[in-house]
């Protein structure tokens, strides 16, 4: 049996109706899964052999090479703190609501330990119990 061929030829068609839906789903996926850094202060962290993960929502105290202090309660970006008294007030405000709230100290490797010790003393005086020091893993040689 012979069927007559149509005079019109149909070409290949790529359906693009759902492309916008796929693009929006990808955007939402990447927005939800992206990890945001609360502190973007560039610094060289000290090296350690053992590393632990920082808890989500931890308060961050950043100490730059020149001794400038930055603070974040864990739910917003870090902001500059004028001096150690202002930092102590920020720490007390966070620790007063929860003494087990995690605090992370992010200090440049060139910072004098005296500055880090002052911050640790402020944390101890405010009653903070969950304190970690950020570092990076040693390079395996």
Image (spheres, grey):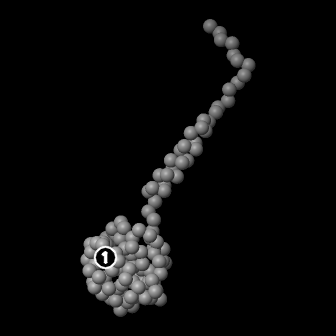
Place of residue 34 in the rendered image (x, y in percent of width and height, measured from the top left)? 46, 60
| Foreground pick, 84 / 1 | 84
Residue ID for mark 1: 95
| Foreground pick, 80 / 53 | 80
Place of residue 98 in the rendered image (x, y in percent of width and height, measured from the top left)? 28, 72
The answer, for residue 114, to whether it is visible in the render is: yes
Judged from this view, the residue extending furthest toward the top is 1
* 120 over 25 or under it: above or below: below
Residue at figure coordinates x 39%, y 73% from the top left = 73
* 2 over 84 or under it: above or below: above
Place of residue 48 in the rendered image (x, y in percent of width and height, measured from the top left)? 33, 78
The answer, for residue 106, to whether it is visible in the render is: no
Place of residue 130 in the rendered image (x, y in percent of width and height, measured from the top left)? 28, 75
Residue at figure coordinates x 36%, y 84% from the top left = 88
Judged from this view, the residue extending furthest toward the right is 7
Describe residue 105's horizontal placement relative to residue 11 as left or right.
left
Q: Secondary structure at mark 1?
A: helix
Describe residue 101's horizontal placement relative to residue 44 as left or right.
left
Residue at figure coordinates x 62%, y 7% from the top left = 1
Residue at figure coordinates x 72%, y 22% from the top left = 8
| Foreground pick, 62 / 92 | 92
Q: Residues within 10 Å of mark 1 (few under 14, many from 20)?
A: many
Locate the C terminus by quadrant.
bottom left
Residue 99's quadrant in the figure? bottom left
Residue 16's quadrant in the figure? top right
């Amino acid at each position: 049996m012979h069927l007559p061929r149509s005079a019109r030829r149909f070409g290949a068609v790529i359906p693009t109706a759902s492309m916008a839906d796929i693009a929006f789903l990808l955007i939402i996926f990447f927005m939800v899964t992206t990890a945001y850094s609360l502190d973007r202060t560039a610094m060289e962290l000290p090296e350690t052999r053992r590393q632990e993960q920082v808890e989500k929502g931890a308060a961050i105290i950043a100490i730059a090479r020149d001794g400038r202090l930055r603070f974040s309660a864990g739910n917003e970006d870090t902001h500059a703190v004028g001096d150690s008294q202002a930092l102590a007030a920020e720490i007390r405000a966070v620790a007063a609501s929860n003494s087990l709230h995690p605090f992370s100290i992010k200090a440049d490797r060139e910072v004098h330990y005296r500055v880090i010790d002052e911050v640790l003393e402020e944390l101890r005086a405010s009653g903070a119990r969950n304190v970690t020091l950020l570092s990076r893993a040693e390079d395996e040689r």
